[in-house]
Amino acid sequence: MSNSSSQATATWENTARVTLLLALTLALFVLQHPVLLVGGTALCATYAVVVLRNSKFHPDQLLILLAAVALFLPAFIKPYFGLSPAFYVLSTMSTFLAAVAVTRHAPLVLLRSLRFIFGASVAGIAWALYVYWGMPEPLGEVIEGSSTNGIPAYLIVIQVGVSLCTYLTHGRLPLISPIFTVLVAFFGYGRGSLVVAGLLFAFSAAHRLAQVRNYALWSRLALVFCAVATILCLYLYIDVLIDLLTDYTKLGAGLLDVNRLQIWRDYSGKIDAWTLLTGADYAGTIVETERQGNPHIAFIRTHAFFGLPATVCALASPLVVFLAPNRTWGSKIVFAAFAGMAALRAASEPILFPTLLDLYYFSYLIVFFRYAPRNDLAAGGQASR
């Protein structure tokens, strides 16, 4: 067997393993059962141990790991929450190390895996819409106990990875998959997913237009034609579009979510000098009395479990790419924007910080530091370790 054939076979084998890990982790998270969340953490930890067992870590890397663990110390003084904060410390470390293991492969491996998961997810969502079409919120019927906002939010996390890995591998952002993400968000009725999906598509389209000089003539003409057609359709049918968005989604009630504002007011009312640093609990708040302990805002849960240092790190995490030396500013802006949009979606749905989907989010940040184009290379996605 030739060397190229061996490499191709190895690439597909790695793709299969990564796809299995990501798909199982997603499924275990989506089903939202405590036993399955433990299983997902164990899966990530096992994958990390198997892949990284022969790796050698530098002393500075170990120091960084210890400093990261220190961020989570408030989790161990939380009697109100029981063992949940301590478990999520373990879960976060497991997903991070699994992300380190996943990103040892070239971005093409992660791209193929994410494309498969994205395609399977969209097909499953289409089937669910067909089956539950007559229901008031068809996507809310798919998984017992899950809201209609959840499924579009999960798809956005996958879409961010598809976009970023396409950028690293091909030097451009995709346009077709964000359109499907917008459509799923529309049928999910939620404001947060629809706004973020729209931003993903708008940024992708703007980026493609900015690169038009680098394309072949027919590609330029096709892109310009699509842009003109889109503008013309918006001009002619803007009233119809606005009616659709206001009548069939929660955008009709405005961008602000009154329920989440109340959650924020209740939680912030429990903050004093000590709980600002270590995190407050939900006692007496709407989270406890009406939301079954679900704060519906990822950063509130991050603060409640881990305190201020970890919350600041989560909020600022999209900006960490700007600390990377010798990486192009274009790649930093793209990664910061897309990671920021994933974090923005988490601001109104607890899909990250901490969840099993942190495996995806950590992978996106780590793959940047390993493979983002350097300043001394021609822009276009030719990545370097």
Image: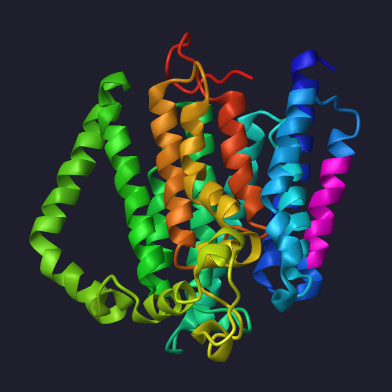
**Residue 281 or residue 58, whichever sits in front:** 281
Q: In which quarter of the image is the N terminus?
A: top right
Q: Does the magenta stretch include residue 182?
A: no
Q: Is residue 218 above or below residue 311?
A: above
**Residue 8 or residue 103, whichever sits in front:** 103
**Residue 279 or residue 218, whichever sits in front:** 279
User: Does residue 210 appear left or right of residue 264 in this picture?
Assistant: left
Q: Is residue 39 magenta?
A: yes
Q: Quadrant of residue 302?
A: bottom right
Instruction: Magenta stretch: give its range.
Output: 38-49
**Residue 246 locus on image (x, y percent):** 23, 76
Inspect this view and state whether residue 166 appears: yes
Q: Quadrant of residue 83?
A: bottom right
Q: In which quarter of the image is residue 266?
A: bottom left
Inspect this view and state whether residue 130 appears: no
Question: Is the stretch drawn in magenta largely helix, strand or loop?
Answer: helix
* Identity of the residue drawn at 45% across and 84% down: 137
**Residue 73 locus on image (x, y percent):** 72, 54
**Residue 285 or residue 322, whichever sits in front:** 285
**Residue 235 locus on image (x, y percent):** 9, 57
- The residue positioned farthest toward the front in the image shown: 273
- The residue positioned farthest toward the left in the image shown: 236
Q: In which quarter of the image is the C terminus?
A: top right
User: Does residue 14 appear left or right of residue 232 in this picture?
Assistant: right
User: Does residue 26 appear left or right of residue 185 in this picture?
Assistant: right
